[in-house]
Image (cartoon, rainbow, N blue to C red):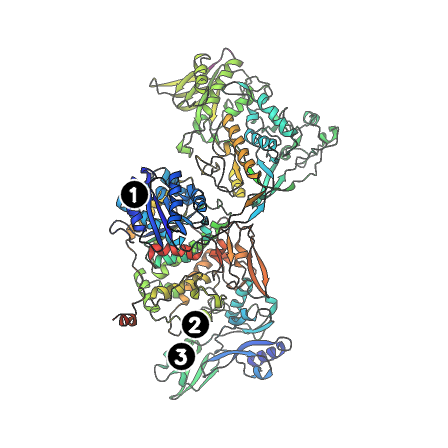
């Protein structure tokens, strides 16, 4: 083999703390290395051209590039060597930037380490084999999980591009958090007026199949062909027959049920249509509140339903579908703010969350758009907003900024003044974060035009006094302690990933961070992709963001999915397991452990043998580590290749 | 009729529809029996069970695949069979197991030690079993030894003297020697410091001649001709004559047997230079028992612990990093 | 090719591509300074790691071996790290029988987002290995007399 080694300076990123020329000189002494040089930017066009020229000039049969992480540029350089006529797998990378130059300044140690990493890469490359992908057909159907504004946008864009779309929503209606909002910042336009038409588009789009009140049960398969099971939860109402007339909700006697859509601001019935613009506009029974289903006697809804849609015997239904790609758009939930004892820990009825306040402001909410104190129904005059309740608070493990609370608090202060002209709003804040288009102007307006009093400081205590709440806090700009007598306290509760997002991530085999937010493929360059091919992210499930950003990401995820599914055939990754039939004793241990059922037993001249189903194997190598005699090996990560790397370090 | 005769009768009966019954027959010298492949009545006459029935007949099973085979088994042999069945390496319905109560098997090295140099084990001209003793005829006269003093180590910690999974059981079941394997041998070994242990293995392995008798005697080493020790694809082991490579082979053997080894001890018995290789396997077995409550070869319906997992592993105390 | 005398010890890391390798990248991008001893072998999944790789490393002169994969339940291949956890735990418990200090081998889980955690793991493990000092080597094959004779 004739190996060429290219040590990238990456400008000064690597060359600043690694003697690249010395590494190249050292690499030239390694076995089979025919050519070694250092290069300013290997990934830039002149760098790639230099690699191609060297391959031709020195008849190289394999290439090592020592530069950044292979997670970044391995695909780039594989294409480069391919352009020079080599098989793309006759290439290895040594990560001397993220793993060397960026984590220490000791030039001697870094140079030595870089040279060793190159030695490992070259040792492995000597055992690389040419690999060729196989192609397989793609299912041109997209699954979107989550029917909030991001999921709606992704579904509509993909459907408009001609893809079949399956939209799965956990709640009985799509709309997500945005549907609960009264108005949106900074335009103060009506949330349901801008979201509603989109929701109707979803319902009417010929390419979209909506499964509301449903959840993803399981996902198997791989990019291009995922097999998905969807659990359609029992709504106890036949949605084919239900016309959404709402008669059942009027007559239902279980009138003290928790109203999930309205955040518990008022009670509701056991059979509900969450809100007037719900899509689908169908009734569903909440089992735990229904008198009949919980063992009592009732059956009123069945009696009044004009179409006979009520079916108390309904059971969950599993729907199976094959899709080529998946967009996760599961959004966020508010954190459990009741851990904050200083704000009453949930004991004071007149301390409400921002989302509850939205429902009070909404004309279609339980108060009909009238702001009323939950305790006595009186209109409040002094309203205190407390920001960063569960945001930027390392003491509860939430060190991040939730991003949108400064803005919605400003909006709510404006709306408060609009609803109650003689009211006074107070906002306790840490910093005002308003970097969006028109955002900072908006936060100025609320103070200057609407005369909201902004107090920079934290609140240390909220306690009841008479029919008022005393909010005690610091005004750090004035350097004094302040107390405000409030009629109502609104907490800008921070957000976290939706409650069951980790479970979904496990089903989709994507990563999530310690807060449950899904990991994008690359923080800058792959903001909507994940590390699992064919799975994309949209909206707050990837990280908290406001409506415009969620919509933008929904479109971006759709664009990526459209790009993927516009192809008829996909190339399979050839880095998969293969069996040496003559070494296989047919013990079946590989079959037992394979997470993908990608290995089957075959009969070879009367002997049982393992065989890899090439399009199903995902290349994890668990079988390889399990097979005692090493009869099944993972291409590109064979025992011998890993041993070569170990031996390059140990010389054993 | 003795148990021996009853077993012979059972073998003869089995031979009516099974071509071969594997047991033990008289060996080359009075202290040793040898595996016996019985195909007819004359073969059965040579059958012997009891104190000399040392070899583990399960060794031959993987090569009998597809042919109905009968085995005469001790309790420990039955565990090896059970593990092979659990791993689908042999099919239970292709087997016919004849069990009997085992009261232990001989360790010839211990006999040699007891003879204290007065004669070699090979010079013994006759061995008779008398209840819990054996009587040896030696050039210097009769020597009476208690079986327990010259039985294999494994017999002193035997929990399964009766082949519980046998299709037919001859004789009365014996009580287990112990209820629980306390791994006292390991505890003794672990009195050594880490440095001493390393020195121990260096010294022991320096005698290794890489004959692979340990592997060839292991009933669960089913790779046989495809052992990674002698392959280049993958190439785990060099042919170099150093302790490191010799030890590494033992580590391959031990890791391949982790969660599978039944402790039959054939590897150690087969070693011509007396390296205590079973210790390595028992170190894994003790952990597997503690961690997963799994004993190889007992329950054929339980998946071996390294071929499965639990989402939460209560017995694995992961260290905080 | 050798470890820098007095400065470094030989530490080999086996990292899964999807989580821990990414975590190490994240640490690099964040310029989280780390000791230079560690050399990383990238594998697709912690389930790919045969415990024999670790034994081979330790017998071959590594002073420490670190394995890091995705957190349980977060495996890119759904189940690989569950198998790895059992195998690696058994291996760690086995090392003392060979006279190898079990602290020379650790396994842990670091996700791609946990750059700081990766820095901490590398710092702590490197310090642990330096605390133990260089591992005592295992005798290699003696030079064959016959080869020397031929040479003469």
Quadrant of the rendered image containing residue C61: bottom left
Disc 3 designates what residue? B111
User: Along the horizontal axis of the image, is B265 left or right of B63?
Assistant: left
Q: Nearer the viewer, residue B315 or A320?
A: A320
Say which quadrant the C terminus of chain A sits in: bottom left
Disc 1 designates what residue? A18
User: Chain letter of disc 2?
Assistant: B
Residue A171 image offset from top left, x and y in percent: 60, 32
Tell me, yes or no, whether the two marked residues, 2 and 3, touch with CB atoms within 8 Å.
no
Residue in the picture at 56% in, 47% down? A135
Quadrant of the rendered image containing residue C120: top left
Which label sits on residue B213?
A: 2
Say which quadrant the N terminus of chain A sits in: bottom left
User: Chain letter of disc 1?
Assistant: A
Residue in the picture at 56% in, 71% down? B64
Q: Residues within 10 Å of mark 2 (few under 14, many from 20)?
A: some
What range of the chain is rendered magenta?
A: A419-424
Q: Residues within 10 Å of mark 1 (few under 14, many from 20)?
A: many
**In this view, the mark in front (2 or 3):** 2
Please check the rendered image and state whether residue A422 is part of the magenta-colored stretch, yes or no: yes
């Amino acid at each position: 083999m004739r190996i060429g080694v290219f040590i990238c300076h990456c400008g000064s990123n690597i060359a600043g703390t690694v003697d690249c020329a010395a590494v190249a000189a050292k690499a030239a002494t390694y076995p089979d290395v025919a050519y070694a040089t250092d290069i300013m930017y290997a990934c830039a066009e002149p760098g790639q051209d230099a690699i191609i020229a060297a391959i031709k000039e020195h008849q190289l049969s394999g290439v090592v590039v020592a530069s950044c992480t292979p997670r970044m540029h391995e695909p780039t350089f594989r294409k480069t060597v391919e352009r020079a006529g080599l098989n793309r797998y006759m290439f290895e990378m040594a990560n001397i930037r993220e793993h060397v130059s960026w984590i220490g300044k000791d030039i001697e140690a870094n140079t030595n380490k870089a040279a060793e990493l190159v030695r490992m890469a070259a040792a492995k490359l000597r055992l690389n084999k040419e690999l060729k992908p196989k192609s397989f057909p793609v299912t041109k159907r997209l699954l979107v999980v989550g029917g909030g504004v991001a999921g709606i946008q992704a579904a509509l864009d993909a459907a408009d591009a001609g893809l079949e779309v399956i939209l799965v929503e956990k709640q009985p209606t799509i709309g997500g958090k945005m549907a609960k909002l009264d108005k949106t910042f900074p335009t103060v336009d009506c949330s349901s007026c801008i979201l509603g038409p989109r929701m109707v588009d979803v319902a009417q789009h010929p390419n979209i199949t909506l499964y509301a009140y449903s959840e993803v049960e399981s996902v198997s398969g791989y990019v291009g062909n995922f097999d998905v099971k969807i659990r359609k939860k029992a709504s106890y109402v036949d949605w084919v027959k239900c016309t959404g007339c709402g008669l059942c909700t009027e007559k239902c006697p279980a009138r003290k049920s928790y109203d999930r859509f309205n955040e518990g601001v008022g009670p509701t019935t056991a059979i509900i249509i969450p809100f007037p613009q719900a899509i689908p506009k169908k009734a569903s029974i909440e089992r735990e509140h229904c008198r009949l289903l919980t063992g009592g006697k009732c059956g009123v809804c069945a009696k009044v339903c004009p179409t006979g849609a009520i079916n108390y015997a309904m059971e969950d239904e599993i729907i199976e579908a094959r899709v080529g790609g998946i967009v996760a758009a599961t959004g966020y939930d508010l954190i459990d703010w009741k851990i904050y004892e200083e704000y009453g820990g949930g004991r004071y009825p007149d301390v409400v969350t921002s989302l509850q306040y939205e429902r009070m402001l909404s004309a279609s909410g339980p108060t009909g758009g009238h702001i009323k104190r939950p305790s006595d129904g009186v209109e409040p005059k002094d309203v205190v907003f407390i920001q960063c309740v569960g945001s930027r608070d390392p003491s509860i493990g939430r060190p991040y900024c939730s991003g949108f609370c400064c803005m919605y608090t400003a909006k709510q202060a404006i709306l408060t003044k609009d609803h109650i002209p003689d009211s006074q709003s107070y906002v306790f804040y840490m910093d005002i974060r308003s970097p969006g288009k028109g955002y900072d102007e908006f936060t100025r307006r609320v103070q200057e035009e609407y005369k909201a009093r902004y107090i920079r400081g934290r609140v240390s205590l909220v306690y009841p006094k008479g029919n008022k709440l005393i909010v005690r806090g610091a005004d750090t700009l004035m350097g004094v302690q302040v107390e405000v007598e409030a009629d109502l306290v609104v907490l800008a509760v921070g957000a976290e990933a939706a409650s069951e997002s980790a479970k979904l991530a496990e089903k989709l085999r994507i990563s999530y961070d310690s807060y449950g937010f899904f990991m994008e493929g690359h923080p800058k360059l792959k903001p909507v992709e994940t590390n699992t091919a064919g799975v994309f992210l949209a909206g707050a499930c990837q990280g908290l963001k406001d409506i415009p950003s969620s919509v933008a990401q929904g479109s971006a995820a759709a664009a990526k999915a459209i790009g993927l599914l516009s192809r008829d055939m996909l190339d399979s990754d050839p880095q998969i397991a293969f069996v040496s039939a003559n070494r296989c004793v047919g013990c079946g241990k590989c079959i037992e452990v394979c997470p993908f059922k990608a290995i089957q037993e075959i009969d070879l001249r009367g002997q049982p043998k393992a065989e890899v189903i090439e399009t199903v194997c995902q290349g994890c190598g668990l079988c390889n580590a399990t097979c005692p005699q090493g009869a099944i090996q993972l291409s590109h990560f064979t025992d011998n290749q890993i041993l070569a790397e170990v031996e390059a370090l140990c010389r054993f | 009729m003795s148990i021996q005769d009853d077993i012979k009768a059972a073998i003869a009966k089995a031979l009516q529809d099974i071509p071969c019954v594997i047991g033990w027959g008289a060996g080359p010298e009075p202290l040793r029996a040898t595996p016996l492949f019985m195909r007819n009545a004359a073969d059965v006459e040579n059958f012997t069970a009891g104190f000399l029935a040392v070899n583990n007949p399960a060794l031959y099973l993987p090569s009998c695949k597809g042919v109905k085979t009968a085995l005469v088994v001790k309790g420990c042999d039955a565990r090896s069979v059970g593990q092979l069945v659990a791993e689908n390496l042999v099919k239970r319905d292709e087997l016919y197991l004849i069990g009997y109560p085992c009261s232990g098997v001989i360790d010839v090295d211990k006999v040699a030690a007891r003879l204290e140099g007065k004669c070699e084990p090979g010079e013994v001209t006759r061995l008779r079993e008398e209840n819990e003793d054996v009587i040896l005829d030696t050039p210097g006269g009769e020597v009476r030894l208690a079986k327990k003093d010259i039985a294999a180590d494994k017999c002193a910690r035997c929990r399964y003297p009766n082949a519980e999974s046998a299709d037919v059981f001859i004789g009365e079941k014996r009580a287990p020697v112990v209820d629980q394997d306390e791994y006292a041998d390991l505890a003794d070994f672990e009195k050594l410091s880490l440095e001493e242990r390393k020195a121990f293995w260096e010294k022991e392995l320096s005698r290794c001649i890489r004959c692979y008798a340990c592997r060839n005697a292991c009933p669960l080493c089913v790779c046989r001709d495809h052992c990674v020790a002698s392959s280049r694809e993958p190439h785990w082991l060099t042919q170099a004559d150093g302790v490191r490579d010799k030890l590494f082979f033992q580590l391959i053997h031990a890791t391949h047997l982790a969660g599978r080894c039944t402790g039959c001890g054939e590897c150690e018995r087969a070693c011509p230079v007396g390296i205590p290789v079973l210790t390595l396997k028992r170190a894994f077995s003790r952990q597997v028992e503690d961690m997963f409550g799994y004993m190889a070869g007992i329950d054929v319906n339980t998946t071996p612990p390294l071929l499965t997992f639990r989402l939460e592993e209560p017995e694995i105390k992961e260290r905080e990093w | 090719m050798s470890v820098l005398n007095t400065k470094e010890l030989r530490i080999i890391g086996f990292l899964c591509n999807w989580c821990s390798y990414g975590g190490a990248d994240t640490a690099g991008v964040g310029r989280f300074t780390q000791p230079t001893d560690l050399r990383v072998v990238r594998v697709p999944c912690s389930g790919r790691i045969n415990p024999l790789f670790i034994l081979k490393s330790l017998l071959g002169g590594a002073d420490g071996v670190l394995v890091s994969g995705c957190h349980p339940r977060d495996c890119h291949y759904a189940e690989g790290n569950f198998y790895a956890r059992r195998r690696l735990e058994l291996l760690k418990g086995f090392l003392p029988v060979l006279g190898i200090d079990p602290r020379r081998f650790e396994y842990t889980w670091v996700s791609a987002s946990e750059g700081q955690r990766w820095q901490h793991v590398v710092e702590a493990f490197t310090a642990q290995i330096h605390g133990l000092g260089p591992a005592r080597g295992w005798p290699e094959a003696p030079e064959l007399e016959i080869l020397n004779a031929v040479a003469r």
